[in-house]
Every structure is written in C-alpha cells, then in structure tokens.
Amino acid sequence: MKKQYGRYSRRVWQAYFNFLDTLYDVRESLIGSELEAAIMRALLVRRYIDRAGGTNVTSLAASLGHPRETVKRKVDALIADNHIAKDADNMLTVTDEFVRDCFPGYAQTFDQILNLADTIRADMNRGAELR
C-alpha cells in the first residue's frame, strides 16, 4: 500500500513537527520517567475526562500493567514532588498545584493543536479547489 505522506504541504508537516516538539518538551519538563508520565496521565484523565475521584495504587498499577510496588515507589516520589496528593482513604489525585504549574504548557499545546488543525484544513481545502 502506497503511503500518503506527500499529499500534505510543507506547512502542514512543519506545523505537525512543531506540535510534536511542544508535546515532548511539556512532558520532559513536567515528568521524569515514562512510568511517572503514565501515572500522571492516568490521574489527569480520571480527574478531567472521567470526572471521577481518586484511585488507589493497586487499581492504578493494574490499569497501567506494572507491578504494584513499582507504581507505589513512583507514586511516593510524585507525592514528595507535590504532583500527587493522597487522602485519608489512600485515594490518589493530581494536586491543584501541579495542574496550575503545568497549565501554561498545556494551553500552548492546545493552541498548537488548533493551529495544526487549521493548517491541515486550509491545505485540504486548497487541494480540493485544485481538483
């Protein structure tokens, strides 16, 4: 099957790579390891997309497919960094401070997603006009 990479303009590819660079920079600046990033992502999804409360280490480890003790060590480090809070029932949530500190990076990322979509849409419309 022939790849369709050539159908997008240089502007689209540049916007796409700028977007990928921003995503990488945001993740690198906020989180250290891949597992820590996965933990934070799972907790952010639970808070903002699922609109659910906290979760415990056992459930988190099961959802990520990692051993409980490994996840617990990473969670303890994220608690020490004030990225995660643990309540009296041992339920884990993302701290408001973490969300507030990382929001400018995410806002920039969302702006780039919208710019990328606009660039692709304009490129596709221009291609449709040429046909």
Image (cartoon, rainbow, N blue to C red):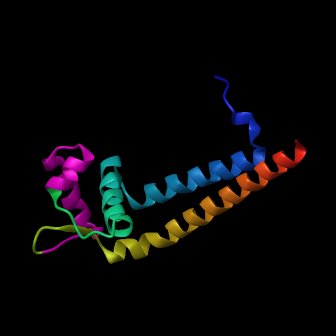
- Say whether residue 9 is left or right of residue 83: right
- Say whether residue 74 is left or right of residue 11: left
Residue 120 vs residue 75, the one in the foreground: 120
Q: Main secondary structure of the magenta part?
A: helix
In this picture, which residue range is highlighted in magenta? 58-87
Q: In the figure, residue 107 lies in which quadrant?
A: bottom right
Residue 72 appears in the rendering: no
Q: Position of residue 80 (x, y in %)?
A: 22, 67
Q: In the figure, residue 74 lies in which quadrant?
A: bottom left
Image height of 95 relative to 19, above or below: below
- Say whether residue 25 is left or right of residue 111: left
- Say whether residue 26 is left or right of residue 61: right
Q: Position of residue 124 (x, y in %)?
A: 77, 49
Image height of 120 relative to 83, above or below: above
Residue 28 vs residue 90, the one in the foreground: 90
Q: Position of residue 20 (x, y in %)?
A: 57, 50
**From this viewpoint, which residue is outermost toward the right?**
130
**Residue depicted at 34% across the width and 77% down the height:** 96
**From this viewpoint, which residue is outermost toward the left?**
89
Residue 127 appears in the rendering: yes
Q: Position of residue 103 (x, y in %)?
A: 47, 72
**Residue depicted at 44% across the width and 56% down the height:** 27
**Residue depicted at 33% across the width and 52% down the height:** 38
